[in-house]
Image (cartoon, rainbow, N blue to C red):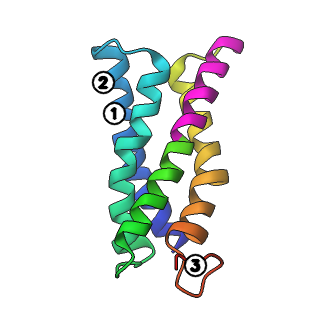
């Protein structure tokens, strides 16, 4: 389960980073907005892969899972945006390496635990949706 979730996260991260680069480099959006949009779009990819493949959590809880997942995604997007802006402002890193550092930290400390034990937990898991 962990390895499937990490593979899904890598694919979603590729989408996330592509959206970030597109929005920042090509559209000229502010860095914080570009960084925040990436996880939201990548999150849609990750939700689908995690629901049906990583955690095999398909069933009657789609709306609850989707709402909970998007809440986690929003928190991750805000932490990513804030973390990258802080790292760029206070270190010698440019936005892309800063984003890699922050994204790895957020993935391991926020995304995986909340996806596993909250969003896609089995009905008898730590948190129940009903």
Taking 100 as reference, is 50 above or below it? below
Q: Is residue 86 above or below residue 121?
A: above
Q: Position of residue 104 (x, y in %)?
A: 59, 44
Pick the front one: 17 or 43: 43
Q: Are marks 3 and 2 in contact (CB under 8 Å)?
A: no
Report if the CB atoms under discs 1 and 2 are less than 8 Å apart.
yes
Q: How many marks?
A: 3
Left or right for 116, reference 69? right
Mark 3 or 2 closer to N-term? 2
Residue 87 within the segment the image draws in magenta: yes
In the rendered image, the residue lying farthest to the bottom is: 124
What is the C-alpha distance between the residues marked 3 and 2? 38 Å
Q: Residue at x 33, y 33 (%)?
A: 18
The residue carrying mark 3 is: 128
Q: Is residue 125 magenta?
A: no
Q: Which residue is at 62% across, 35% downward?
A: 101
Q: Tell me the residue at 67%/52% (across/down).
A: 109
Residue that mark 2 sits on: 22
Relative horizontal placement of residue 117, taking residue 32 as reference (left or right): right
The front one of 110 and 64 is 64
Q: What's the magenta region?
A: 77-91
Q: Quick one: SS at disc 2?
A: helix
Q: Element under label 3?
A: loop
Give the spatial CA distance, label 1 vs label 2. 6 Å
Give the image quarter of residue 42. Answer: top left
According to the picture, the residue beneath numbered tag 1 turns out to be: 18
């Amino acid at each position: 389960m962990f390895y499937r979730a990490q593979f899904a996260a890598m694919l979603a991260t590729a989408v996330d980073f592509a959206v970030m680069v597109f929005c920042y480099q090509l559209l000229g959006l502010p860095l914080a907005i570009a960084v925040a949009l990436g996880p939201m779009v990548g999150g849609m990819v990750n939700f689908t892969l995690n629901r049906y493949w990583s955690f095999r959590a398909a069933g009657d809880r789609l709306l609850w899972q989707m709402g909970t997942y998007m809440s986690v995604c929003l928190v991750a997007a805000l932490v990513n945006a804030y973390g990258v802006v802080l790292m760029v402002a206070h270190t010698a890193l440019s936005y892309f390496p800063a984003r890699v550092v922050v994204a790895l930290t957020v993935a391991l400390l926020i995304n995986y635990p909340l996806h596993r034990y909250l969003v896609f937990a089995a009905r008898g898991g730590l948190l129940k949706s009903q």
